[in-house]
Amino acid sequence: MKNLNMNILVTDGMEKDAIEFLINQGFNVEEKFYPEEELGKKLQNVDVLVVRSATKVRADIIDEAVKGNRLKMIIRGGVGLDNIDCEYARAKGIEVRNTPGASSDAVAELVIGQLIVLARFINMANLTMREGRWEKKAYKGVEIAGKTLGLIGFGRIARSVANKAKLLGMNIIYNDLPGCVVDDTDDYKCVTLDELYKNADFITMHVPLTKETKYMIDKDAINKMKDGVYLLNCARGGVINECDLLDALNEDKVAGAAIDVYEKEPTPNMDLLNHPKVSPTPHIGASTHEAQKRIGTEITEIILGKCDKLGMNLRQAL
Ligand code: NAD
């Protein structure tokens, strides 16, 4: 087998078939997490860096990496690019890619699961039964059928959630940036944020984390919501202000919250996690076998495509 002299560093894990495929094609693949203070130097000898969300690729790391004049591409296995200084990398000639559609259904299914978990206290019922308590009367829930689901951000994941929630009998309203309004169906109503806050029984976040969306759900926004609203965040920690959410849970303004992503990962605010009205998961939105397989396949396609662009004629050579 030909060695292509192409070094790929995978820092946050990648589906094993995809790694084997790349190794079989002649790429040198190293799978290892490097702490921030070591990563830049390591990247001086790397052509392609593959990350998920744990590795942060900031400007100082990129500055160190480019000294090796080798790093060509950073691939984010997944969607959110907030852990990479994309513009900076691109300005230094490093291509930045992600695998946008591969995990939409996986995240959407987690959201649907959490809607029902919150509505029926499944998180607490699980926990208290394991403690030997039979609290049948404590868990009188609500039905999601007939309730209004408000989606903030109406991109790939949100649309998948909306399609599924509609089949479960929910009314769907959403908010997105001007110009991003869908025209494919009348079933989903685009509303202002204030209208969404006023009318939604369940609100689910599907925006990327940007300067504009940071803390978009804070005390002021929560105060505009219905009393007893349920909030779900499977987008990014930081789009909801966790302290304000905790206050709202304690004041019964928010009836329940499902959270997959946190301001601080992997060391989230334990007061929030331990709150009985919270259903926490450890950033597992994209963690299905199917999504990881799709992400792995998409990453290998991106790498082969890059090799094509570099004139390596790899596909013919293989
Ligand atoms: P997408 O780009 O298809 O959709 C995002 C939508 O948000 C777009 O329609 C955009 O116009 C809208 N938007 C941006 N700023 C907004 C604002 N200020 N107000 C209203 N709408 C705004 O992305 P997607 O594939 O649906 O993913 C959404 C987010 O989900 C990602 O950015 C990522 O952070 C997160 N995500 C989380 C997991 C997980 O494991 N929990 C997995 C995948 C993605």
Image: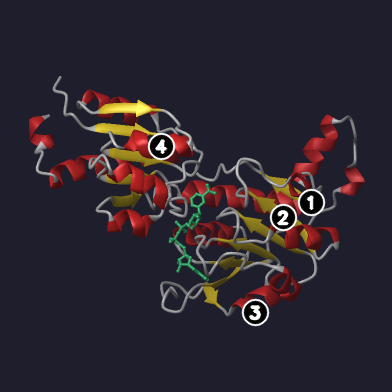
Q: How crowded is mark 3: few (under 14 residues within 10 Å), some or many (20 or more)?
A: few
Image coords of residue 229 (percent x, y) = 74, 65
**Which is more N-terminal, label 3 or label 2?**
3
Q: Is residue 148 above or below residue 59?
A: below
**Which residue corresponds to the image point at 72% horizontal and 61% vertical from the top-left?**
230
In the image, is the residue at mark 2 within 8 Å of ligand 1 by its beta carbon? no
Mark 1 and mark 4: Cα distance apart in space: 39 Å
- Name the residue that disc number 2 marks: 257
Is residue 297 in sight in this rendering? Answer: no
Label 4 vs label 2, nearer the camera: 4
- Name the residue that disc number 1 marks: 277
Mark 2 and mark 3: Cα distance apart in space: 20 Å
Looking at the rendered structure, the secondary structure element under dot 1 is: loop
- In the figure, residue 241 lies in which quadrant? bottom right
Type of the residue with mark 3 = Asp
Query: Is residue 6 found left or right of 137 in the rendered image?
Result: left
